[in-house]
Image (cartoon, coloured by chain):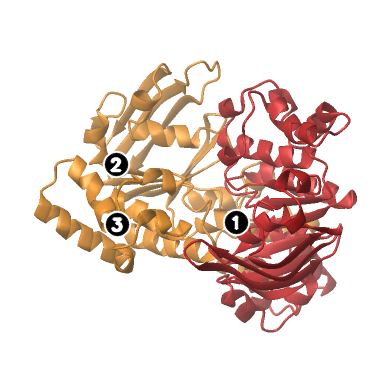
Chain colours: A red, B orange
Amino acid sequence: MNLRTKDLHHVYAGDIHALKGISLTIAGGRCVLLLGQNGAGKSTLLKHLNGILKPTSGEVLVGETNTKLHDAAFLAQFVALSFQNPDDQISSKSVVEEAMFGPRNLGKQDPEALAREALRMFSLEGDANTHPYDLHPSKRKLLTIASAIAMDTPVVAFDEPTAGFDVTQRCLFGKALERLKERGKTVILVSHDLDYSLQYCDSVILMDHGSVTFHGDKIHLLSRPDLREILRASGLGLPILCRMSKAIGLRTAPSSVEEFVQLLHDNRTI
Amino acid sequence: MAHPIITVEDYSFSYKASNKKALDRLSFSIDEFECCGIIGPSEAGKSTLCYAITSVLPHYFSGGKTEGRVLTAGLDALSTPMDLMMKKVGLLIQSSGVFLSGIKPTVREEIAFSMENLGISRTEIVERIQSVMEELGIESLAERDPLTLSGGEMQRVALACVLALDPQVLILDEPTSSLDGEGVRDLRLILSKLKGKKTILLVEQRMELLPGLIDSLLVLREGKKVYSGHAERFFSSIGSLEEDIGAPIWTQVCYHIASRGNRTAGTLPYTYRQALKALGTIR
């Protein structure tokens, strides 16, 4: 499902201009990484996609649906959102109930099957009957991610999904992203963790003070000679792998450890 | 010779209504002015250990089962009241927003609040606020409302509140987990300035932060000690990377190269510089 914004502005109470004319098209089935400093407008943009926020001016189209004409409950069938802080989201008495909440509200045929499948993706099936607040905080975060995926919507957005995750949990999330892509879902990822998230995305949106400063394929971004300057304008440093590849004289910047090793190999250096 | 400022002896803890030990017969010690990294998978007991050392556990998590001994700055951490312990040990938790009082209108008053609670004199409070704000580079935030700060700024203010009490030991529980790149760089700079002046315990998932900063390393898994000792030795041995612990991304690169070439012997780079050097010789 395509997502489109046309000259989208959002002004919060107190005259805070959070989005300043965003025009974007995100093609269906892509995984997009949304980057920018705290306060750049990333979360405000996300909240427009499922109608939690409405444009002050301009338009947001989810597929063919204009978010201005519908409420958030209706738009939930298209876009599922997983929040940064799990405690903003959790409301049920057991893990499986929590994961069923979304698909049940959407009137899906078998909410429990969807819930259990999503829990399995994150090795949470053994905790199905546990109270969400008895889960370790990082597992609680996995639960909010699983709950969003269980809604089986064409678009899924994750706000800082991997903060505080260990190696195994990061791997689980990476695999989940790949499965979502296989199923043709449009995925939007908001993350500070550039070194991790770059490897999973197809394209990148950079935001700064409410405006988009770059939108394009990951490969195009990584091959730009002014990559360092573009990232700095959004308050981001060069990813470590890019810094390393530059330092040893590679021309292309890799987005994952595996790609880095492959690049070295292709240059017949190992 | 350096003497231990934290001693944990055969210490176990289970939370109320849990039949699993969050910490399981843990023993280790940390010397004064040492900077120690604490790493391990989720549910290894890292946060529980922070709570044990700062005497938060017996006061906030009643009904838990405790065995063994924890000595912090000469005090028994299992029985010392928190107001006494707070003067010796500062704890910065993951969500610094929770840390702030939420009732003070300015950053300056927020920093004063923790000291007022401990009965420090007014003139001393004013002096300490000034020096801690300078140290952390947050003078410009002094009159801001704490609740309107960005994540990175809030984190620095929370750290200022802790440092204003001039603790001997500083404990940070995953301080970078919600910071952006710039915030991480700033925090690393602050920590490297504090290193050598305070004893520092740093719980981290971001392994790239550790080389050059920490002296020693404590690795936990499921409440048990997996490793304690020299940090570089742990990461540079190839075997450690096959675990679920993680390593700096440059160490991972060299590990993948080594396993591709079926090279099992030798050591892995620990710092970024070492990695560049190793890659240079490969080329």
Residue drawn where x is 71% and y is 30% of the image? A124
Dividing the picture into quadrants, the one containing residue B43 is: top right
Tell me which numbered mark, 2 or 3, is placed earlier along the sequence.
2
* Element type where label 2 sits in the image: strand
Classify mark 3: helix, strand or loop: loop
- Judged by depth in the image, the label closer to the viewer, 2 or 3, is 3
**Disc 2 designates what residue?**
B89
**Pointer 1 chain:** B
- Mark 1 lies on residue: B248
State whether residue B64 appears in this view: yes
Quarter location, residue B49: top left
Name the residue located 61 percent from the left edge and 45 percent from the top edge.
Answer: A165
Viewer-closest of A225 and B263: A225
Q: Which residue is mark 3?
A: B106
* Kind of residue at disc 3: Thr
The amino acid type, in three-letter code, at marker 1 is Pro
Q: If you read the primary sequence from the N terminus, does the residue marked by circle 2 or circle 1 appear first?
A: 2
Q: Position of residue B135 (x, y in %)?
A: 29, 64
Q: Is residue A71 left or right of residue A230?
A: right
Residue at left offset 66%, top offset 58%: A54
